[in-house]
Amino acid sequence: MSGILPPDLSTTFLIAAILPLIIGFVVGVVVRNALKVGIALAVLVVLLIAAGIITPSQVIAPLAALVKSGATQATITAYADRVAGYLPYSSLTFIVGLALGLLKG
């Protein structure tokens, strides 16, 4: 008779299970707050354009210059791969923590 054995509740197992949950929660909170700031900046720019204080070209020109003089897509992809290598995104507890951070953080 073979069955699935329950995991041992050793300290190592608990740390290995809880640490990705905490990291996922923190990443979720950071992403949620970054989205809030991005949306607030976009609304502010739209309001300033609507009020006539700035023109769309004043917003687009610096962004275009940043894209033209910035890093290439290969460097951005390499940097994103390196950062993603630090995150345990294949762990179920990380995904649960990320969802909790995005929803409740």
Image (cartoon, rainbow, N blue to C red):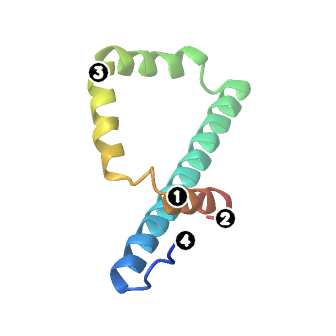
* 79 or 48, nearer to the observer: 79
Residue for badge 3: 74
Q: Amino acid at mark 1?
A: Leu
Q: Residues within 10 Å of mark 3 (few under 14, many from 20)?
A: few
Residue 104: numbered disc = 2
- Measure how far apart labels 3 and 1 are at the Cα level: 29 Å
Q: Amino acid at mark 3?
A: Ala
Residue for badge 4: 3
- Residue 102: image location, x then y, percent: 62, 56
- The answer to whether the residues at label 3 and label 4 have Cβ atoms under 8 Å apart is no
Q: Amino acid at mark 4?
A: Gly
Residue 92: numbered disc = 1
- Residue 96: image location, x then y, percent: 58, 60
- The answer to whether the residues at label 1 and label 2 have Cβ atoms under 8 Å apart is no
- Would you identify the image quadrant in which residue 38 lies? top right
- Measure how far apart labels 1 and 2 are at the Cα level: 18 Å
- Residue 51: image location, x then y, percent: 72, 28
Residue at image position (68%, 29%) is 46
Looking at the image, tell me whether mark 3 or mark 1 is earlier in sequence order. Answer: 3
Q: Is residue 74 left or right of residue 43?
A: left
The answer to whether residue 17 is above or below residue 90 is below
Residue at image position (36%, 44%) is 84
Q: Amino acid at mark 2?
A: Lys
